[in-house]
Image (spheres, grey):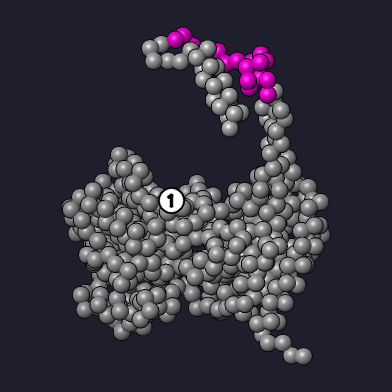
Amino acid sequence: MTLDDDLLSIQGVRDLIRRSETALEVLSGWTQQDIDRLVKNVMEACHKKAEYLAKLAVEETGFGKWEDKVLKNNLAGPVLYESIKDMKTVGVIHEDPAARCCEVAVPVGIIAALVPSTNPTSTVIYKSLIALKGANTIIFSPHPNARKSIRTTVELVREALKASGAPEDAVQVIGEPLTMEATSELLKHRKVGLILATGGPAMVKAAYSSGNPAIGVGAGNGPAYIEKSADIKTAVRHIIESKTFDNGTICASEQSIVTEAVIESEVIAELQAQGGYMLPDGDIDRLGKFILRPNGTMNPVIVGKSAEKIAELAGICVPAGTKVLVAKQTEVSHKNGYSREKLCPILAFYVEKNWEACCKRCIELLNNEGIGHTMTIHSKDEKIIREFALKKPVSRLLVNTPGSLGGTGATTSLPPALTLGCGSVGKSSTSDNITPLHLINIRRVAYGVKELADLRGGGNPPRPEFGPSSAGSVSRDQLEAIVRNVLSRLGNQ
């Protein structure tokens, strides 16, 4: 009997799950020292091949710059390792003798991981390390357009596992045939403990509707606000460095510049001096129609391409050496591609009368797309920075730093990560940069320290000392009477 591709792929995933279970059982007997040694070995193996994997990813996908992908591979490798190497993730991880409590780390189990085509090799390195650090196993579902580079990275990790005496099947990837049915089977399988979803909105939605616990991330659309007190030259440099890093394929990169009228001319002059090209009206319209497809989604042709290549594809003439295409805008809407996420060196440019209006514009942009993700502010005014921190619906407000590098923890003290939570406002289960601590459950062991009679007032447990009574305060006798009354009512229900 000949099976169709969908049936073959589903059976293939079920086989991966069984092998992953066996590997998980082996890792369950490993100590923290064993796991730490394993994670270090995997990191070092990936670090040695960082350049090779970067070039492979660009060759296969056509996205980004291999030089920048080397840095991303190293962010996911050595930089991440330094951040997590001393984390306690196995066995007893915390004890409180006074409270008679302790905490025990428990692996979430088999992790299903989606991998995007924009960051294929670095995502595999990053997710493998944080999964293994928690003594978990992981199965990758590769993006079809990056299957070669993803599978090559997985094989590299598996070789390091074998050399470390660990089960190779602790890290696996869906093979051929690669179908949507295979990914669906992986996400919905009852043996999967957690889904790590990095990819397009459709994939993230599928992860959250799978019936399994999931950590997913939404689209980014972070504005960069340049406030009048900012060092304009440095602010523009940060924005251009970020937006051109790997040709804008990191979702935390800036998508718009929002600034005040009083410094508009200075900002534009600095943009032009540093390689930004202010598009004339006719070219703004021409490129605007090229950014989105008729169905309202981003045109994949522009993703990860240089500014000069995008201009060529759109039929626009730009000066040689142009780094970023900048379009002055006044409208924010889902139909306006400039006001949405653009994973390439294109920036919208908004000018407002004061910082309060800039604040509202930034919120409008985030509500349009990218709510809960990331934005940046360039300012020396701590009061305004505090106001933005209090009001902006983002999980990361980055101050005086490049968005793509700051959000991922490369130029800030945030945990190094390539999966950035968007919080409940962004329909994500967390607002954190994802670390190994998100991939373990914690079992609490709590000893009894009171008896029921103590709670009812029949015993003489240690009592806190209350300070001198003051007007409007509750005395100790009154407080005990309130507690006895509440417990009495609960007992009668």
Q: Is residue 165 left or right of residue 375?
A: right
At x 68%, y 24%, the residue is 452
At x 56%, y 58%, the residue is 215
At x 71%, y 62%, the residue is 191
Could you tell me if residue 334 is visible in this image? Answer: yes
x and y, in percent, of residue 151 in the image: 66, 73
x and y, in percent, of residue 87 in the image: 65, 45
Q: Does the magenta stretch include residue 458?
A: yes
Q: Relative to 2, is 163 above or below?
A: above
Amino acid type, label 1: Arg
On-image quarter of the N terminus: bottom right
> Dot 1: what SS?
strand
Q: Is residue 261 left or right of residue 465?
A: left
Q: Which of 45 and 218 is in front in this view?
A: 218
Which quadrant holds residue 93?
Answer: top right
x and y, in percent, of residue 465 in the image: 55, 13
From which residue to which does the magenta span run? 452-469
Residue tagged by mark 1? 396
Q: Relative to 397, is 174 above or below?
A: below
